[in-house]
């Protein structure tokens, strides 16, 4: 009898260890996923603004205020906030742009890579 009890206790003990390992592993995985999402969801307020003096910005004639661009270079209704590459909404003052990864551009800005949104 005592021998069976030990055996049962041993199996129960193994089961408890497995559950503990599972809970620890699940907790670590949850933490990793949370950290991963945290690094990919930086808001526009947390990202630096594109510098108008940067090499890429200069190459594309990017400016924070589109109305300063010569009318011969830019159609007057084109702004970052209505460009297909703008990650924000029409009301966002600053948002990401796929041309300038990790930075934000001005909603009222513009550059020569402006592209129309698909209907
Ligand atoms: Fe603005 Fe579009 Fe140029 Fe990006 S690609 S800087 S959103 S005009």
Image (cartoon, rainbow, N blue to C red):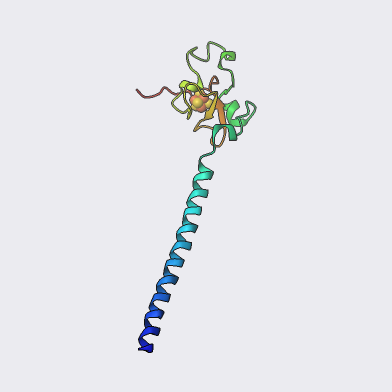
Find residue 5 and report its image quarter: bottom left
Q: Horizontal and vertical percent for residue 20?
A: 46, 67
In the orientation shown, which residue stands out farthest toward the front?
1
Residue 113 visible at all:
no
Looking at the figure, which quarter contains the C terminus?
Answer: top left
Residue 105 visible at all:
yes
Q: Horizontal and vertical percent for residue 42?
A: 54, 38
Q: Horizontal and vertical percent for residue 89?
A: 47, 25
Left or right of 96 on screen, residue 13: left
Residue drawn at 58 percent across, 31 percent down? 56
Residue drawn at 47 percent across, 54 percent down? 30
Check the image and report above or below for 75 versus 16.
above
Pick whichever, 94 or 12, lies toward us: 12
Pick whichever, 33 or 74, lies toward us: 33
Residue drawn at 50 percent across, 19 percent down? 79
Left or right of 95 on screen, residue 22: left
Pick whichever, 61 or 51, lies toward us: 51
Q: Horizontal and vertical percent for residue 70?
A: 57, 12
Looking at the figure, which quarter contains the N terminus?
Answer: bottom left
Residue drawn at 65 percent across, 27 percent down? 53
């Amino acid at each position: 009898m005592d021998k069976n009890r030990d055996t049962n206790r041993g199996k129960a003990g193994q089961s408890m260890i497995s559950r503990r390992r599972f809970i620890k592993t699940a907790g670590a995985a949850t933490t990793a996923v949370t950290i991963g999402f945290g690094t990919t969801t930086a808001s526009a307020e947390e990202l630096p603004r594109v510098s108008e003096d940067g090499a890429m910005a200069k190459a594309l004639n990017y400016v924070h205020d589109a109305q300063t661009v010569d009318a011969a270079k830019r159609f007057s209704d084109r702004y970052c906030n209505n460009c297909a590459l703008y990650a924000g909404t029409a009301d966002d003052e600053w948002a990401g742009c796929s041309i300038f990864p990790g930075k934000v551009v001005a909603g009222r800005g513009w550059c020569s890579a402006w592209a129309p949104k698909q209907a």
